[in-house]
Image (spheres, grey):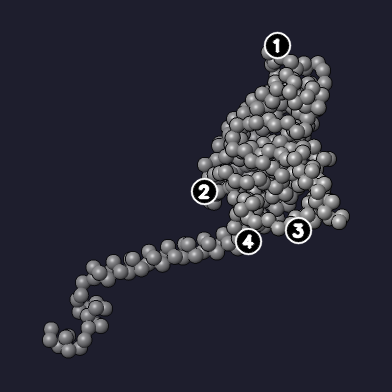
Amino acid sequence: MYLRNLIFLCTLLAPSLAGDLTISYAPSTLRFSHAGALRASSLDDVLAAAMGYTPQTSPWSGLTITSPFKPPSAVVVVGIDGSGSAVQEEGQSYALQEDRSLTNVYGALHSVVSARAHRPTHFVHMEVADGAGTFVVELSLPDDSSLLATREPDASFLLEIGALPVLINKMSVNSSVPHGGQDFVFYQLESFALLVKTYGDDSPQVREGKQLLRSAIDRLVAGARAVYQDQVLVVSVVMEKSSEILSRPVREVLQARQVYSKSDLGLASEYGEDYPAIFNIILFLSIALLIAVIAVSAAMAFMDPGRDSIIYRMTNPRMKKDQ
Protein backbone atom coordinates (compact mmCIF):
# COMPACT_ATOMS: atom_id res chain seq x y z
CA MET A 1 0.00 0.00 0.00
CA TYR A 2 2.82 2.38 0.87
CA LEU A 3 4.59 1.66 -2.40
CA ARG A 4 1.43 2.36 -4.39
CA ASN A 5 0.98 5.70 -2.64
CA LEU A 6 4.60 6.59 -3.32
CA ILE A 7 4.26 5.74 -7.02
CA PHE A 8 1.08 7.81 -7.24
CA LEU A 9 2.80 10.77 -5.58
CA CYS A 10 5.75 10.55 -7.97
CA THR A 11 3.32 10.43 -10.90
CA LEU A 12 1.69 13.65 -9.72
CA LEU A 13 5.04 15.37 -9.33
CA ALA A 14 6.49 14.12 -12.63
CA PRO A 15 5.15 16.95 -14.86
CA SER A 16 6.83 19.59 -12.65
CA LEU A 17 10.15 17.75 -12.85
CA ALA A 18 10.44 17.60 -16.62
CA GLY A 19 13.43 19.51 -17.95
CA ASP A 20 14.79 20.13 -21.39
CA LEU A 21 18.13 19.30 -23.01
CA THR A 22 19.29 21.06 -26.19
CA ILE A 23 22.32 20.27 -28.35
CA SER A 24 23.47 23.81 -29.10
CA TYR A 25 26.45 22.63 -31.17
CA ALA A 26 28.04 19.28 -31.99
CA PRO A 27 31.07 18.49 -34.19
CA SER A 28 30.72 16.39 -37.33
CA THR A 29 31.90 13.26 -35.48
CA LEU A 30 28.70 13.24 -33.40
CA ARG A 31 25.17 12.93 -34.70
CA PHE A 32 22.11 13.50 -32.55
CA SER A 33 18.84 12.11 -33.89
CA HIS A 34 15.27 11.94 -32.67
CA ALA A 35 14.89 9.81 -29.56
CA GLY A 36 12.83 9.46 -26.42
CA ALA A 37 13.28 11.27 -23.15
CA LEU A 38 16.68 11.14 -21.47
CA ARG A 39 17.08 10.59 -17.75
CA ALA A 40 19.39 13.03 -15.98
CA SER A 41 20.99 10.03 -14.26
CA SER A 42 22.09 8.85 -17.73
CA LEU A 43 23.38 12.22 -18.92
CA ASP A 44 26.89 11.59 -17.58
CA ASP A 45 27.05 8.33 -19.58
CA VAL A 46 25.93 10.12 -22.75
CA LEU A 47 28.53 12.87 -22.29
CA ALA A 48 31.25 10.32 -21.51
CA ALA A 49 30.39 8.33 -24.65
CA ALA A 50 30.44 11.51 -26.76
CA MET A 51 33.92 12.32 -25.43
CA GLY A 52 35.27 8.89 -26.36
CA TYR A 53 34.85 6.97 -23.08
CA THR A 54 32.95 3.71 -22.88
CA PRO A 55 30.02 4.09 -20.47
CA GLN A 56 28.85 1.39 -18.09
CA THR A 57 25.63 1.03 -20.11
CA SER A 58 24.20 2.35 -23.37
CA PRO A 59 21.07 3.99 -21.99
CA TRP A 60 19.98 6.20 -24.87
CA SER A 61 19.62 5.84 -28.65
CA GLY A 62 19.77 9.55 -29.57
CA LEU A 63 23.58 9.70 -29.92
CA THR A 64 25.52 8.21 -32.85
CA ILE A 65 29.31 8.45 -32.93
CA THR A 66 30.36 8.60 -36.59
CA SER A 67 34.12 8.66 -35.91
CA PRO A 68 35.23 6.99 -32.65
CA PHE A 69 38.86 7.91 -33.31
CA LYS A 70 38.25 11.70 -33.26
CA PRO A 71 36.39 12.60 -30.07
CA PRO A 72 35.70 16.27 -29.29
CA SER A 73 38.34 18.27 -27.48
CA ALA A 74 35.84 19.70 -24.99
CA VAL A 75 32.27 19.55 -23.74
CA VAL A 76 30.54 22.66 -22.40
CA VAL A 77 27.32 22.21 -20.43
CA VAL A 78 25.20 25.23 -19.54
CA GLY A 79 22.77 24.48 -16.73
CA ILE A 80 19.81 26.85 -16.38
CA ASP A 81 17.45 26.90 -13.43
CA GLY A 82 14.24 27.36 -15.41
CA SER A 83 11.68 27.30 -12.59
CA GLY A 84 9.17 25.69 -14.96
CA SER A 85 9.72 28.11 -17.85
CA ALA A 86 10.76 26.86 -21.32
CA VAL A 87 13.59 28.77 -22.99
CA GLN A 88 13.06 27.20 -26.46
CA GLU A 89 16.59 27.36 -27.82
CA GLU A 90 17.75 26.49 -31.31
CA GLY A 91 19.09 22.99 -31.85
CA GLN A 92 18.04 19.38 -31.35
CA SER A 93 16.03 19.23 -28.12
CA TYR A 94 15.02 16.33 -25.90
CA ALA A 95 12.84 15.95 -22.84
CA LEU A 96 14.87 15.45 -19.68
CA GLN A 97 13.56 13.40 -16.77
CA GLU A 98 15.07 14.95 -13.67
CA ASP A 99 16.10 12.17 -11.33
CA ARG A 100 19.48 13.73 -10.60
CA SER A 101 20.76 17.28 -10.20
CA LEU A 102 23.27 18.75 -12.64
CA THR A 103 25.83 18.94 -9.84
CA ASN A 104 25.56 15.18 -9.38
CA VAL A 105 25.84 14.68 -13.15
CA TYR A 106 29.11 16.62 -13.10
CA GLY A 107 30.39 14.54 -10.18
CA ALA A 108 29.54 11.27 -11.90
CA LEU A 109 31.17 12.38 -15.17
CA HIS A 110 34.27 13.52 -13.27
CA SER A 111 34.58 10.10 -11.62
CA VAL A 112 34.17 8.17 -14.88
CA VAL A 113 36.66 10.27 -16.85
CA SER A 114 39.24 10.48 -14.05
CA ALA A 115 39.25 6.70 -13.70
CA ARG A 116 39.68 6.01 -17.43
CA ALA A 117 41.47 8.97 -18.97
CA HIS A 118 44.95 8.39 -20.39
CA ARG A 119 45.41 12.04 -21.34
CA PRO A 120 45.40 15.39 -19.50
CA THR A 121 41.95 16.57 -18.45
CA HIS A 122 40.70 19.89 -17.12
CA PHE A 123 37.44 20.12 -15.17
CA VAL A 124 35.49 23.30 -14.44
CA HIS A 125 32.25 23.49 -12.47
CA MET A 126 31.23 27.07 -11.82
CA GLU A 127 28.24 29.18 -11.00
CA VAL A 128 28.39 32.01 -13.53
CA ALA A 129 27.59 34.61 -10.87
CA ASP A 130 30.74 33.63 -8.95
CA GLY A 131 32.91 33.73 -12.06
CA ALA A 132 31.49 37.11 -13.11
CA GLY A 133 32.98 38.73 -10.01
CA THR A 134 36.52 38.39 -11.38
CA PHE A 135 36.11 40.85 -14.28
CA VAL A 136 33.98 43.73 -15.53
CA VAL A 137 30.92 42.73 -17.56
CA GLU A 138 29.51 45.18 -20.07
CA LEU A 139 26.06 44.56 -21.53
CA SER A 140 24.14 47.16 -23.51
CA LEU A 141 20.34 47.21 -23.35
CA PRO A 142 17.89 49.04 -25.62
CA ASP A 143 16.21 52.17 -24.27
CA ASP A 144 12.82 50.45 -24.13
CA SER A 145 14.14 47.45 -22.22
CA SER A 146 11.88 46.12 -19.48
CA LEU A 147 14.92 44.97 -17.48
CA LEU A 148 16.80 47.43 -15.28
CA ALA A 149 20.43 46.95 -14.26
CA THR A 150 19.77 48.90 -11.05
CA ARG A 151 17.26 46.50 -9.49
CA GLU A 152 17.14 42.86 -8.51
CA PRO A 153 16.80 40.21 -9.81
CA ASP A 154 17.38 42.01 -13.14
CA ALA A 155 20.94 43.00 -12.21
CA SER A 156 21.98 39.44 -11.31
CA PHE A 157 20.47 38.05 -14.49
CA LEU A 158 22.16 40.66 -16.70
CA LEU A 159 25.46 40.00 -14.93
CA GLU A 160 25.26 36.26 -15.63
CA ILE A 161 24.32 36.44 -19.30
CA GLY A 162 26.99 39.08 -19.87
CA ALA A 163 29.64 36.96 -18.18
CA LEU A 164 28.75 33.66 -19.86
CA PRO A 165 30.45 34.33 -23.24
CA VAL A 166 33.43 35.98 -21.51
CA LEU A 167 34.08 32.96 -19.32
CA ILE A 168 34.39 30.58 -22.25
CA ASN A 169 36.84 32.90 -23.99
CA LYS A 170 39.06 32.75 -20.90
CA MET A 171 39.11 28.93 -21.02
CA SER A 172 42.09 28.98 -23.37
CA VAL A 173 44.33 30.08 -20.46
CA ASN A 174 43.98 26.88 -18.41
CA SER A 175 42.86 24.51 -21.15
CA SER A 176 44.49 21.09 -21.42
CA VAL A 177 43.71 20.81 -25.14
CA PRO A 178 47.09 22.27 -26.28
CA HIS A 179 48.73 19.40 -24.37
CA GLY A 180 46.58 16.75 -26.06
CA GLY A 181 43.93 16.72 -23.35
CA GLN A 182 40.21 17.40 -23.02
CA ASP A 183 38.19 20.03 -21.16
CA PHE A 184 34.94 19.38 -19.26
CA VAL A 185 33.16 22.63 -18.47
CA PHE A 186 29.91 23.06 -16.52
CA TYR A 187 28.37 26.51 -16.08
CA GLN A 188 25.24 27.05 -13.99
CA LEU A 189 22.91 30.05 -14.17
CA GLU A 190 20.62 30.57 -11.20
CA SER A 191 19.19 34.06 -11.74
CA PHE A 192 16.75 33.21 -14.55
CA ALA A 193 14.57 31.33 -12.05
CA LEU A 194 14.43 34.43 -9.84
CA LEU A 195 13.31 36.42 -12.86
CA VAL A 196 10.47 33.97 -13.52
CA LYS A 197 9.40 33.84 -9.88
CA THR A 198 9.46 37.64 -9.52
CA TYR A 199 7.64 38.69 -12.70
CA GLY A 200 5.86 35.57 -13.95
CA ASP A 201 6.45 33.48 -17.06
CA ASP A 202 4.24 35.67 -19.29
CA SER A 203 5.78 38.98 -18.21
CA PRO A 204 7.72 41.21 -20.64
CA GLN A 205 10.76 40.92 -18.36
CA VAL A 206 10.87 37.14 -18.72
CA ARG A 207 10.21 37.26 -22.47
CA GLU A 208 13.09 39.68 -22.90
CA GLY A 209 15.19 37.59 -20.55
CA LYS A 210 14.65 34.50 -22.71
CA GLN A 211 15.74 36.40 -25.78
CA LEU A 212 18.88 37.68 -24.04
CA LEU A 213 19.61 34.19 -22.73
CA ARG A 214 19.35 32.65 -26.20
CA SER A 215 21.66 35.37 -27.54
CA ALA A 216 24.16 34.74 -24.75
CA ILE A 217 24.21 31.00 -25.52
CA ASP A 218 24.75 31.77 -29.22
CA ARG A 219 27.76 33.91 -28.29
CA LEU A 220 28.96 31.17 -25.98
CA VAL A 221 28.79 28.66 -28.84
CA ALA A 222 30.71 31.02 -31.14
CA GLY A 223 33.37 31.53 -28.47
CA ALA A 224 33.67 27.80 -27.74
CA ARG A 225 34.05 26.99 -31.42
CA ALA A 226 36.81 29.58 -31.71
CA VAL A 227 38.66 28.35 -28.61
CA TYR A 228 38.42 24.65 -29.51
CA GLN A 229 38.51 24.97 -33.32
CA ASP A 230 34.99 23.51 -33.75
CA GLN A 231 35.91 20.35 -31.81
CA VAL A 232 33.50 21.03 -28.96
CA LEU A 233 30.13 19.75 -27.82
CA VAL A 234 27.88 22.45 -26.35
CA VAL A 235 24.81 21.32 -24.39
CA SER A 236 22.29 23.51 -22.59
CA VAL A 237 20.12 21.99 -19.88
CA VAL A 238 17.03 23.67 -18.45
CA MET A 239 16.16 22.05 -15.12
CA GLU A 240 13.96 22.63 -12.10
CA LYS A 241 15.60 23.80 -8.90
CA SER A 242 17.72 21.00 -7.47
CA SER A 243 15.98 21.11 -4.07
CA GLU A 244 12.70 20.18 -5.76
CA ILE A 245 14.12 17.07 -7.44
CA LEU A 246 13.15 13.71 -5.99
CA SER A 247 16.02 11.95 -4.31
CA ARG A 248 17.78 9.42 -6.49
CA PRO A 249 17.37 6.44 -4.10
CA VAL A 250 13.56 6.82 -4.20
CA ARG A 251 13.60 6.88 -8.00
CA GLU A 252 15.85 3.81 -8.08
CA VAL A 253 13.41 1.86 -5.86
CA LEU A 254 10.53 2.79 -8.14
CA GLN A 255 12.50 1.91 -11.26
CA ALA A 256 13.41 -1.46 -9.79
CA ARG A 257 9.72 -2.28 -9.21
CA GLN A 258 8.46 -1.11 -12.60
CA VAL A 259 8.97 -2.89 -15.92
CA TYR A 260 9.45 -0.90 -19.09
CA SER A 261 10.11 -2.02 -22.62
CA LYS A 262 13.04 -0.60 -24.57
CA SER A 263 10.71 0.95 -27.10
CA ASP A 264 8.97 2.89 -24.32
CA LEU A 265 12.20 4.36 -22.95
CA GLY A 266 14.05 4.70 -26.27
CA LEU A 267 16.90 2.48 -25.04
CA ALA A 268 19.71 1.36 -27.27
CA SER A 269 21.20 -2.13 -27.27
CA GLU A 270 23.51 -2.76 -24.33
CA TYR A 271 27.16 -3.70 -24.89
CA GLY A 272 29.89 -4.71 -22.47
CA GLU A 273 32.96 -2.63 -21.68
CA ASP A 274 35.15 -4.87 -23.90
CA TYR A 275 32.93 -4.47 -26.96
CA PRO A 276 34.96 -1.63 -28.62
CA ALA A 277 38.27 -3.48 -28.19
CA ILE A 278 36.88 -6.80 -29.45
CA PHE A 279 35.17 -5.09 -32.38
CA ASN A 280 38.38 -3.34 -33.47
CA ILE A 281 40.48 -6.51 -33.11
CA ILE A 282 38.08 -8.55 -35.24
CA LEU A 283 37.66 -5.76 -37.80
CA PHE A 284 41.34 -5.07 -38.45
CA LEU A 285 42.35 -8.74 -38.25
CA SER A 286 39.72 -9.55 -40.88
CA ILE A 287 40.98 -6.74 -43.09
CA ALA A 288 44.60 -7.91 -42.72
CA LEU A 289 43.70 -11.54 -43.57
CA LEU A 290 41.66 -10.44 -46.58
CA ILE A 291 44.55 -8.35 -47.92
CA ALA A 292 46.96 -11.27 -47.36
CA VAL A 293 44.70 -13.71 -49.25
CA ILE A 294 44.31 -11.27 -52.14
CA ALA A 295 48.08 -10.66 -52.31
CA VAL A 296 48.96 -14.39 -52.27
CA SER A 297 46.29 -15.18 -54.87
CA ALA A 298 47.54 -12.42 -57.17
CA ALA A 299 51.17 -13.55 -56.78
CA MET A 300 50.35 -17.15 -57.64
CA ALA A 301 48.16 -16.14 -60.56
CA PHE A 302 51.01 -14.24 -62.24
CA MET A 303 53.83 -16.64 -61.24
CA ASP A 304 56.04 -17.99 -64.06
CA PRO A 305 55.73 -21.83 -64.02
CA GLY A 306 59.46 -22.43 -64.50
CA ARG A 307 61.60 -25.32 -63.18
CA ASP A 308 62.44 -23.43 -59.99
CA SER A 309 58.85 -22.55 -59.08
CA ILE A 310 56.55 -24.23 -56.59
CA ILE A 311 54.18 -25.06 -59.42
CA TYR A 312 56.95 -27.10 -61.14
CA ARG A 313 57.89 -28.90 -57.91
CA MET A 314 54.31 -29.94 -57.22
CA THR A 315 53.72 -31.25 -60.74
CA ASN A 316 53.33 -35.01 -61.35
CA PRO A 317 56.82 -36.67 -61.89
CA ARG A 318 55.69 -38.31 -65.17
CA MET A 319 54.79 -34.93 -66.57
CA LYS A 320 58.26 -33.69 -65.63
CA LYS A 321 59.87 -36.61 -67.63
CA ASP A 322 57.78 -35.80 -70.65
CA GLN A 323 59.27 -32.33 -70.60
**Label 1 residue SS:** loop
Disc 4 residue crowd, few under 14, some 14–19, many 20+, Cα 10 Å? few
Kindly state the secondary structure of the residue where label 3 is placed: helix
Amino acid tagged 1 = Asp
Q: Secondary structure at mark 4?
A: loop
Residue 282 is left or right of residue 25, and the answer is left
Q: Which residue is mark 1?
A: 144
Considering only order in the chain, which callout, 2 or 3, is on the residue closer to the N terminus?
2
Residue placed under numbered mark 4 in the picture? 273
Label 4, label 1: how far apart the Cα atoms are: 57 Å
Q: Which mark is residue 256?
A: 3
- Cα–Cα gap, marks 1 and 2: 47 Å
x, y percentage for residue 102? 75, 42
Q: Residue at x 20, y 88 (%)?
A: 317
Q: What residue sits right under mark 2 in the picture?
A: 66
The residue sitting at 63% across, 46% down in the picture is 36
Q: Tell me how far mark 2 sits from mark 4, CA to CA.
A: 19 Å
Which sits earlier in the primary sequence, circle 3 or circle 4?
Answer: 3
Label 4 amino acid?
Glu
The answer to whether residue 42 shows anywhere in this view is yes
Q: Amino acid at mark 2?
A: Thr
| Above/below status of 258 relative to 172 | below
Looking at the rendered image, the quarter that the C terminus falls into is bottom left
